[in-house]
Amino acid sequence: MMNKKASILIVIVIIAIIALWQAQTIRNPAITASENEIVIESDLLKATDIAVSNASNSSATTGKGILNESDIRDINKANEQNIASPAFSQSDYAMYDEATLERMADSGDVSAMKALWVKYLKSDDVNDVEKMRQLVTKAIVYGDRDMFQHMPELSSLSDRFTNPEASPEQKHNAMIDLLAYHEFMGMRGNLSEKYSGQEVFFIVHSTPEAPIKLTAADKAAILARAREIYANYEGERMKLGLGPFDNSVPDGLKKLYEMQRESYLQAMGDNAI
């Protein structure tokens, strides 16, 4: 059996890779598009790859903090079913024309929404930027958990926080909102996005010379704002007759999240939410 120190090291490597990737994709999403295939990558897929390698190299992989074969099957099933969607790879959708994809998206087909999003991303038409924003929002309303990383609020809030002309109050409010959006992702069952997003914020913006310290009031405000964001999205679902969000995840994915949380708590310290 792999010892505890080795398993913790594995988790730290997972989070480090996620953090580096997330920092690069805040403004430049990792998207690969070919004529017959569209792939939107997420941190969960990268974490899963490392976890699978870890499990395959261990002859006895049971106990908390170690992924066993059953856990890996759960995670792979989640990948395939888009439960906490780590990837979108639908070659058929890449071959549909825009009008067909729009009809499919209007009927609630999330894969069509993603295919359209990629088409607009490759477009030079400035009007397509707004269409992309609308598609991300629509996909999330319809229950997708892969498009969180492309929420337009993330880049706009980051810009507000880093704006040299922003007042301390404006920067503080932007920080609360930005961390709240990542908290919302965790509430929706994608804890990888919560952990990596919040960690990256502090990695990028908190320095020994100017450390950011969240107060109890800050954390309460973040949680309250996250619940508000959640209610707004779920309210849109209810208007469409889709019912409440399903935030469930399989046991294997829960275990992966537990492993990631251990590293998250170590990295965040008193700023952990």
Image (spheres, rainbow, N blue to C red):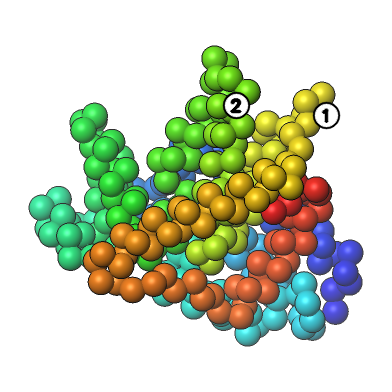
Q: Is residue 246 left or right of residue 264?
A: left
Residue under circle 2? 169
Report the front residue among 244 and 149.
244
What kind of residue is marked 2? Glu
What kind of residue is marked 1? Pro
Q: Residue at x 30, y 67 (%)?
A: 238
Instruction: Find residue 208 and name its label.
Output: 1
Q: Would you call the spot at circle 2 few (<14 residues within 10 Å), some (14-19), or many (20 or more)?
A: few
The x, y position of residue 232, in whole percent, is: 39, 55
Q: Quadrant of the N terminus?
A: bottom right
Q: Would you call the spot at circle 1 few (<14 residues within 10 Å), some (14-19), or many (20 or more)?
A: few
Q: Is residue 182 visible?
A: no
The span from disc 2 to disc 1 (Cα, nearest Å) is 21 Å
Tell me where residue 65 sits by quadrant.
Answer: bottom right
Report the front residue among 182 and 170.
170
Q: Residue at x 51, y 57 (%)?
A: 227
The x, y position of residue 97, in whole percent, is: 13, 53
SS label for mark 2: helix
> Is the residue 243 above or below the residue 236 in the image?
below
Q: Quadrant of the C terminus?
A: bottom right
Q: Is residue 106 visible?
A: yes
Q: Of discs 2 and 1, which sits in the foreground?
A: 2
SS label for mark 1: loop
> Is the residue 74 above or below the residue 5 in the image?
below
The x, y position of residue 260, in whole percent, is: 70, 61
Q: Residue at x 31, y 60 (%)?
A: 236
> Is the residue 148 above or below the residue 108 in the image?
above
Q: Residue at x 76, y 38 (%)?
A: 213
The x, y position of residue 160, in whole percent, is: 51, 27
Q: Is residue 83 left or right of residue 195?
A: left
| Marked residue nearer the N-terminal end (2 or 1) | 2
**Name of the residue lying farthest toward the top:** 165
